[in-house]
Image (cartoon, rainbow, N blue to C red):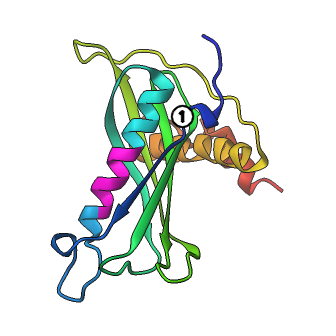
Amino acid sequence: MKAKKPSESLAITTKVVLPNETNTLGKLFGGALLAWMDEIAAVSAHRHAKQVVVTSSVNHVSFDIPVDLGAFVTLEAKVSRAFRSSMEVVIDVSVEDRETGESKMSNQAIYTFVAVNKEGKSVEVPPIEPETEEEQRRYDAALRRKQLSLILAGKMEPDAATELKALFAK
């Protein structure tokens, strides 16, 4: 199966924070943002796999700054690494100042998706071939996260986690 570049899975959307998406302080509900991230990440994973994809896990979410009512929120998602049938997708979220047009990072998340056929059985996906230094860093980190996840789930022995062991070897 031919490798694909992360840029081939790029998905971008911009949302406006509306009143029904905010809490009593006028800030975006975390759950609304999670749904937006899941949606854009699914688009990215589908672009990579060209298959139906299902959310397997939410590996990491950061809520670094509150997002105000009326803010313009841009979500960018790209597949950072593909395994046999799963794909890690990194979502970067930025908030645009409506007066200056200046944009700043507000959140980041890492979701994992699995490609499935019509019967719901997992199917193979193409590997990823990073192009930039950042894509390479994300690609390498994805394997460490996968190994840690497998260890925590009891599906891998710690001694077999070569990438994790390399972090602590001196």
Task: Locate residue 126 relative to residue 27 in the image: left or right.
Answer: right
Position of residue 59 relative to residue 70, above or below, is: above
Circle 1 Cα neighbour tier, 10 Å, few/some/many (<14 / 14–19 / ≥20) = many
Q: Is residue 154 visible?
A: no
Q: What is the quadrant of residue 27 in the picture? A: bottom left
Residue placed under numbered mark 1 in the picture: 9
Return the x and y of residue 50 as percentages of the image width and height.
Answer: 43, 20
What residue sits 65% from the left and 20% below the top? 3
Locate the C terminus and report the quarter of the image it occupies: bottom right
Residue 157 in sight in this render: yes
User: Which amino acid type corresponds to the residue marked 1 in the rendered image?
Assistant: Ser
Question: Residue 97 or 135: which is nearer the viewer?
Answer: 97
- Which SS type dominates the magenta stretch? helix
**The quarter of the displayed image where residue 2 is located:** top right
Q: Which is nearer the eye, 60 or 146?
A: 60
Residue at 33% in and 38% down: 56
Q: Height in image: 15 above or below 64?
A: above
Percent position (x, y) of residue 97? Answer: 50, 79
- The N terminus - image quarter: top right
Membership of 140 in magenta stretch: no
Q: Residue at x 58, y 76 (%)?
A: 102
- As drawn, 153 above or below 95: above
| Left or right: 97 in relation to 33 | right
Relative side of 79 to 51, left or right = right
Farthest-out residue, front = 99
* Label 1: element kind: helix
Q: Residue at x 30, y 70 (%)?
A: 17
Residue 12, horizontal then vertical, whole percent: 48, 48
Give the magenta-colored segment's residue range. Answer: 33-40
Residue 107: x and y in percent read 47, 67
Decide if residue 132 is on the left or right side of residue 102: right
Q: In the current view of this chain or complex, which residue is farthest to the right? A: 170
